Image (cartoon, rainbow, N blue to C red):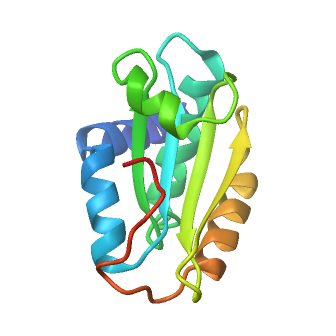
Amino acid sequence: MLASAVQMVLQAALLVGGTPTYERAYYDAQANGRPLLVLVGADWCPGCRTMKQSVMPRMSAAGRLAGVNFAVVDTDARGDLADRLMRGGSIPQLIAFSQGADGQWRRQQVTGATSEAGVASLIRQAVGHQATASRGSQSAIGN
């Protein structure tokens, strides 16, 4: 019972605390030099709901999203943006964009609902690849 209550609080914290819009997270990624992590999904998708309502709120509450700029893109509400970000049509897709020391952007993704360990691994890879990039460089992260 207590675990259910804690989970509901964590979910509410991520949703009420306001996951930044894609545009805000994109801007922040360019400004602060941290990777951009985007969850692309839809409300009708069970795996997407698991990621959005369980996995990502727990990651956030534990401070495990602190090294990235995180956003959620709904395929129904933002189909044009989702199409630009996704590779393939399966959802959910968790996509990490990181810029290396050479200035090149790398895109990595996990398709399908994944565990906290899987998300953490993707974040570690993105943060490891990320380097201080010049603030005015061109990017290839969906804009």
Provide residue 60's location: percent of width, then percent of height. 45, 56
Q: Position of residue 13 (x, y in %)?
A: 32, 45
The quadrant holding residue 25 is bottom left
Residue 79: tell me if it is visible.
yes
Q: Quadrant of residue 49?
A: top right
Q: Residue furthest top?
A: 44
Which residue occupies the foreground of this view, 84 or 131? 84
Q: Nearer the viewer, residue 52 or 31?
A: 31
Q: Nearer the viewer, residue 78 or 72?
A: 78
Task: Please name the residue shown 36% across and 24% down the image.
Answer: 78
Q: Is residue 129 above or below residue 77?
A: below
Residue 95 position, x and y percent, is: 59, 49
Q: Is residue 130 above or below residue 118?
A: below
Relative side of 90 to 31, left or right: right
The quarter of the picture where the N terminus appears is: top right
- Count numbered badges in the picture: 0
| Residue 97 position (above or below residue 81) | below
Residue 53 seen anywhere in this rendered image of the structure? no
Residue with the most extreme front position: 138
Residue at left 62%, top 70%?
126
Q: Which residue does the image show at 49% across and 35% down from the upper left?
A: 84
Left or right position of 22 against 58: left
